Image: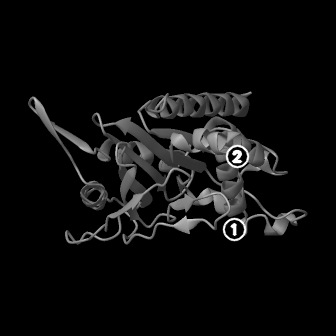
C-alpha cells in the first residue's frame, strides 16, 4: 500500500511536469510567406532534456533554437526551462525593437549558466538562428551541438560547421559563438537535430548490446525525408520520419530524447510538380 501510494504520487508529479513542459513548447509553427517550419519532438521518458522554439520576430524574420540539456529526466527538463527563458532573439525597447544575433544570444546564455552553476554543474548544447524569410537565408550559431544539415534530394547531407563550446563550461566573457549564414535553394532543407538520432536507428538485426552505439543511419532517414518533401509535401516528409522512429524494435524504450526542426522553402514541392507536368 505505502509503496504503491508513493509510486502513484511520483507518477502523477511526472505527468504534471510533462504537461507543463509541453505547454512551454510552441503549439503551432509560424505561418510565413516563402518558408515552412516543422518539428518532430519525442521525449525518451515523461519529460525531455531537449527543448526548442520557433517564433516570428517581424515581417521578414523568424527566430529559432534547438537545445539539449546534458543528462536525463527531471534535472535536464528543469534546465530546458532556464534555457528557454534565456533564448531571446528580440529585445523590445519602448515602441521599437532590435533583433539580437544568434552568437550574442548564446554568449549571454552561456554567461548566465556559468554564473548560476551550483554543486551540480549544468551544461547544454544548442543551435540558435534567425531566418530571413524574404532572402531564404539562415544565420545561426551553435554551442557544442551536432552540426545542422543542408539536405537536397540526391545529394549527401552537407553539415553547416560552426565554432562554439558547450554552454555552461567556460566563463571567459570572450567565449565566441561564430555565426554562419547559409542561403537555402528552392530544393534544399535545413535540419537542426539533437544527438538522440545517432542511436535512434540501429542497423537491422542489431544485437541488444549494440543498440546504444551511435550510427549514421539517421542521415539516410533525413535524405528520404527530403526526397518525399520534393515529391509530395513537408507534412508527408515529417510523417515518414515519425513512422521510421515508430518502426524501430526498441521504440518503446527509446534511448534518448529526439528533436528535429526542419526549415524549408515553400517552393520546392510546387516547382517539382510543375517540372513533372511540363
Residue 97, image quadrant: top left
In the displayed structure, 206 sits above or below 20; it is below
Q: Quadrant of the C terminus?
A: top right
The foreground one among 37 and 252 is 37
The foreground one among 126 and 254 is 126
Instruction: Report x, y in % for residue 244.
Output: 76, 48
Drawn side of residue 70 relative to residue 255, left or right: left
Residue shown at 64%/38% (left/top)? 233
The foreground one among 276 and 18 is 276
Residue shown at 72%/50% (left/top)? 254
Disc 2 target residue: 228
Drawn side of residue 262 relative to residue 45, left or right: left
Secondary structure under tag 2 reads helix
Q: List the single residue furthest toward the right.
A: 205
Disc 1 target residue: 216
Label 2, residues with CA under 10 Å away: few <14, some 14-19, many ≥20:
some
Residue shown at 88%/66% (left/top)? 207
Residue 84, image quadrant: top left
**Residue 46 visible, this orientation:** no
Query: For the residues carrying marks 2 and 1, which lies nearer the camera in this image?
Result: 2
Instruction: Report x, y in % for residue 96.
Output: 11, 34
* Total tally of numbered discs in the picture: 2
In the displayed structure, 166 sits above or below 118; it is below
Instruction: Report x, y in % for residue 54.
Output: 42, 39
In the displayed structure, 72 sits above or below 14; it is below
Instruction: State the colouring used for the structure image.
Output: one colour
Q: CA distance from mark 2 to mark 1?
A: 20 Å
Amino acid at each position: 500500500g505505502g509503496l504503491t501510494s508513493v509510486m502513484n504520487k511520483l507518477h502523477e508529479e511526472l505527468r504534471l511536469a510533462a504537461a507543463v513542459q509541453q505547454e512551454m513548447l510552441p503549439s503551432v509553427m509560424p505561418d510565413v510567406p516563402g518558408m515552412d517550419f516543422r518539428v518532430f519532438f519525442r521525449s525518451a521518458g515523461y519529460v525531455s532534456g531537449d527543448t526548442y522554439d520557433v517564433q516570428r520576430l517581424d515581417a521578414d524574420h523568424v527566430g529559432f533554437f534547438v537545445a539539449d540539456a546534458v543528462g536525463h529526466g527531471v534535472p535536464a527538463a528543469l534546465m530546458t526551462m532556464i534555457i528557454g527563458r534565456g533564448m531571446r532573439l528580440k529585445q523590445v525597447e519602448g515602441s521599437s525593437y532590435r533583433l539580437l544575433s544568434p552568437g550574442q544570444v548564446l554568449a549571454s546564455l552561456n554567461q548566465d549558466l556559468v554564473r548560476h552553476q551550483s554543486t551540480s554543474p549544468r551544461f547544454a548544447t544548442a543551435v540558435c538562428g534567425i531566418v530571413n524569410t524574404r532572402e531564404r537565408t539562415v544565420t545561426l550559431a551553435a554551442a557544442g551541438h551536432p552540426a545542422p544539415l543542408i539536405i537536397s534530394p540526391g545529394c549527401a547531407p552537407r553539415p553547416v560547421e560552426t565554432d562554439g563550446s558547450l554552454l555552461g563550461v567556460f566563463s571567459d566573457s570572450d567565449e565566441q559563438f561564430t555565426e554562419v549564414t547559409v542561403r537555402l535553394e528552392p530544393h534544399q532543407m535545413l535540419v537542426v537535430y539533437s544527438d538522440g538520432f545517432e542511436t535512434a536507428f540501429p542497423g537491422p538485426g542489431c544485437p541488444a548490446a549494440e543498440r546504444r552505439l551511435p550510427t549514421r543511419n539517421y542521415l539516410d532517414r533525413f535524405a528520404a525525408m527530403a526526397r518525399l518533401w520534393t515529391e509530395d509535401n513537408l507534412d508527408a516528409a515529417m510523417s515518414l520520419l515519425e513512422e521510421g522512429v515508430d518502426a524501430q524494435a526498441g521504440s518503446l524504450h527509446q534511448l534518448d530524447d529526439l528533436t528535429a526542426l526542419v526549415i524549408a522553402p515553400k517552393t520546392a514541392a510546387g516547382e517539382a510538380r510543375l517540372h513533372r507536368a511540363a
